[in-house]
């Protein structure tokens, strides 16, 4: 929604002049020409440029269309091969007697007119700027705007258009005194290195080291025989920081047992039932009885840490849909899809035999009695059997005397069962007899157990509970914190004379609430600041006194302007509200704003909370902060 910009007028009065400019190609200077594998010059730089260890000072440059220039005292450049590209770092050293070289983006570039060309600007006293305008990689598609600036102080700056990257060819970035000087180790130029030699460089390769300087300006300031490298202009960006409120875990639950003995003591002879509700499950302790497999039960072909699939005769109702297959894992869990088999959702071990709270991030909905079992040890097997019980069809998946993994092997069988009601969608866990015998070698061979449930995808961690006393409970979707985002990047057009790009600020997970009682409305406000951010945030339950929002952080240092963006929520309750704005001038490259969202909700919510904004009948939630960094196009 486009809103009035009236608030901006007073807001911008607070704004001070900002930092160094990033790249603008609105006025690149005088055109040297276009071409492929082309040298221009020598051309006078209008400055006397010093370079420690290289002789000089230098007054002229020879520019190569491939994104590099060579320094001379007026004559031709030495070892300025037309076919020098970014695939060979030794090019920066050159041969004996080679001219110093300045490489903002040395690659196999092509500049073809009229859009692509190389230009030089010597109109600013003490500065020479060479710009590669609308250059492309050989056989590449994306245009690249790159600038090298040399100052009479000896400082060098490289500037890159936002989004600039290596497509398929490597690129060298650096400065060198040439003359076959030994090539030192590469630097990470974005990490502000301090170098000690006359060559400072980094090679970028799309397959190995992606180019990470797009939208920035980096400065090489002389320091002894080397350079101090620093980023002096950051890319246009919206950077999220901190977190909003509230993040409340409601859809997953579990109990973790550190040892086999602890699990056996708590679970043997016990059961747990999950009964479907509209948004999850009603979970109760007890209610199930073990049903021993009959002679008709089928042993599943499961190896150690293995998974197999079974297809019930009736799809299993789950999550508002139905699973036509169930994936049974040897280690004591059953999923509604295949993705839970040994995946990166369980760091740092990346294994499916180490129970951990990361189960809640597994991609598929699953029912967990998780432990390191080994169906290949001993005579026990995992079995399946389906039966009609009254009006219902039940699928039984049974670990029938299946042993735990142990080295050396030890007799330690366990028997437990999942009962999937294919008619109603309920799931019953029954633990008949878990072994109390551990491996004796934990944690190498873990003997821990994790019992619980999680829907597919990431969910918050509720912490381990004691199932026997914490139940009953009802699972519902997690309460997600208010989230603020924005796009596209805040770029000032027209070389700094035009308006900033139209940016849309979106608040997600907005609660449905409006004091007037209108349905489907979210009451949202954006709070703008020019003063800065509060690292880590300040809890509004204590800052500076309790204002009735415990657990909600304040992320901005001041409240210089407010924008009401209340209105219908896109996507229904928990959906989004948006606000679009193109900031008018005056805007300066490097300018930063800070913004945070606030949304009203009925007092006392979310359930279990005490949120009640002092002096109002409402509660409120805050979002993460957003740092807005403006730069030139």
Image (cartoon, rainbow, N blue to C red):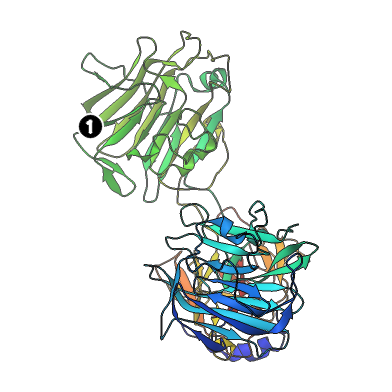
Residue beneath the point at 35% across and 21% down: 303
Frontmost residue, 387 versus 338:
338
- Secondary structure under the numbered disc 1 in the rendered image: strand
- Can you tell which quarter of the image residue 94 is in? bottom right
Callout 1 crowding tier (Cα within 10 Å): few <14, some 14–19, many ≥20: some
In the image, is 530 to the left or to the right of 465? right
Q: Position of residue 470 (x, y in %)?
A: 54, 36
Could you tell me if residue 374 is visible in this image? yes
What is the total number of numbered labels drawn onto the structure image?
Answer: 1
Residue farthest left in this picture: 313
Q: Is residue 529 visible?
A: no
Q: Give whichever of 24, 262 is nearer the camera.
A: 24
Task: Say which residue appears at 67% left-offset and 90% top-offset.
Answer: 10
Q: Vertically, is 337 above or below 396?
A: below
Going by the picture, which residue comes out furthest to the right? 224
Question: In the depicted view, which residue is nearer to us: 602 or 350?
Answer: 350
Residue 278, image x and y in percent?
36, 51
Residue 221 screen position, x and y as percent: 74, 69
| Relative vertical location of residue 34 with respect to residue 175 in this rendering, above or below | below
Q: Badge 1 is on which residue?
A: 393
């Amino acid at each position: 929604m486009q809103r009035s910009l009236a608030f901006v007028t007073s807001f911008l009065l607070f704004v001070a002049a900002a930092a160094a400019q990033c790249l603008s190609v609105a006025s690149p200077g005088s055109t040297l020409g276009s071409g492929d594998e082309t040298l221009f010059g020598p051309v006078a730089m209008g400055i006397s440029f010093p370079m420690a260890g290289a002789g000089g000072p230098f007054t002229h440059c020879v520019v190569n269309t491939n994104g590099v220039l060579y320094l001379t005292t007026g004559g031709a450049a030495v070892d300025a091969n037309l076919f020098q590209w970014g695939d060979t770092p030794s090019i920066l050293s050159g041969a004996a007697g080679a001219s110093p070289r300045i490489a903002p983006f040395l690659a196999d570039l092509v500049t073809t007119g009229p859009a692509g060309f190389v230009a030089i600007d010597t109109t600013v006293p003490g500065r020479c700027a060479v710009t590669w305008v609308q250059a492309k990689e050989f056989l590449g598609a994306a245009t690249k705007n790159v600038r090298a600036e040399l100052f009479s102080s000896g400082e060098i700056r490289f500037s890159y258009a936002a989004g600039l990257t290596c497509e398929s060819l490597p690129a060298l970035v650096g400065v060198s005194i040439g003359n076959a000087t030994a090539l030192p180790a590469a630097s990470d130029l974005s990490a502000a290195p301090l170098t000690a030699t006359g060559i400072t460089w980094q090679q970028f390769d799309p397959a190995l080291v992606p180019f990470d300087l797009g939208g920035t300006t980096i400065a090489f300031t002389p320091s002894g025989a080397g350079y101090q490298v620093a980023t002096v202009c950051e890319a246009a960006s919206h950077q999220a920081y901190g977190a909003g409120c509230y993040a409340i875990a409601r859809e997953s639950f579990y109990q973790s047992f550190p040892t086999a003995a602890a699990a056996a003591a708590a679970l043997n002879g016990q059961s747990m039932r999950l009964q479907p509700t509209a948004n999850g499950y009603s979970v109760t302790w007890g209610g199930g009885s073990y049903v021993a497999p009959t002679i008709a039960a089928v042993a599943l072909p499961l190896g150690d840490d293995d998974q197999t699939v079974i297809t019930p005769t009736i799809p299993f109702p789950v999550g508002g849909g139905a699973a036509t297959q169930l994936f049974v894992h040897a280690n004591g869990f059953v999923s509604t899809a295949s993705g839970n088999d040994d995946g990166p959702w369980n760091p740092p071990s990346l294994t499916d035999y180490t129970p951990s709270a990361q189960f809640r991030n597994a991609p598929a909905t699953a029912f967990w009695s998780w432990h390191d079992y080994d169906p290949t040890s001993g005579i026990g097997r995992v079995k399946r059997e389906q039966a009609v019980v009254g009006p219902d069809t039940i699928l039984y998946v049974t670990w029938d005397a299946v042993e735990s993994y142990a080295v050396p092997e030890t007799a330690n069988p366990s028997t437990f069962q999942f009962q999937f009601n294919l008619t109603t969608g309920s799931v019953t866990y029954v633990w008949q007899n878990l072994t109390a015998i551990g491996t004796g070698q934990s944690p190498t061979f873990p003997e821990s157990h994790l019992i619980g449930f999680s829907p597919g995808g990431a969910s918050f961690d509720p912490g381990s509970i004691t199932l026997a006393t914490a139940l009953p409970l009802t699972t519902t979707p997690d309460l997600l914190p208010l989230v603020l985002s924005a796009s596209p990047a805040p770029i000032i057009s027209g070389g700094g004379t035009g308006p900033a790009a139209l940016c849309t600020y979106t608040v997600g997970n907005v609660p449905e609430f409006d004091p007037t009682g209108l349905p489907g409305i979210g009451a949202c406000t954006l709070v703008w600041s020019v003063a800065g951010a509060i690292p880590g945030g300040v809890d509004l339950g204590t800052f500076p006194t309790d204002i009735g929002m415990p657990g909600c952080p304040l992320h901005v240092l001041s409240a210089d302007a407010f924008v009401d963006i209340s209105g219908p929520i896109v996507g229904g309750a928990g959906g989004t509200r948006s606000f679009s704005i193109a900031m008018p001038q005056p805007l300066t490259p490097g300018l930063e704003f800070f913004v945070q969202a606030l949304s009203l909700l009925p007092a006392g919510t979310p359930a279990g909370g005490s949120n009640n904004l002092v002096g109002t009948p409402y509660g409120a939630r805050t979002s993460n902060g957003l740092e807005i960094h403006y730069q030139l196009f």
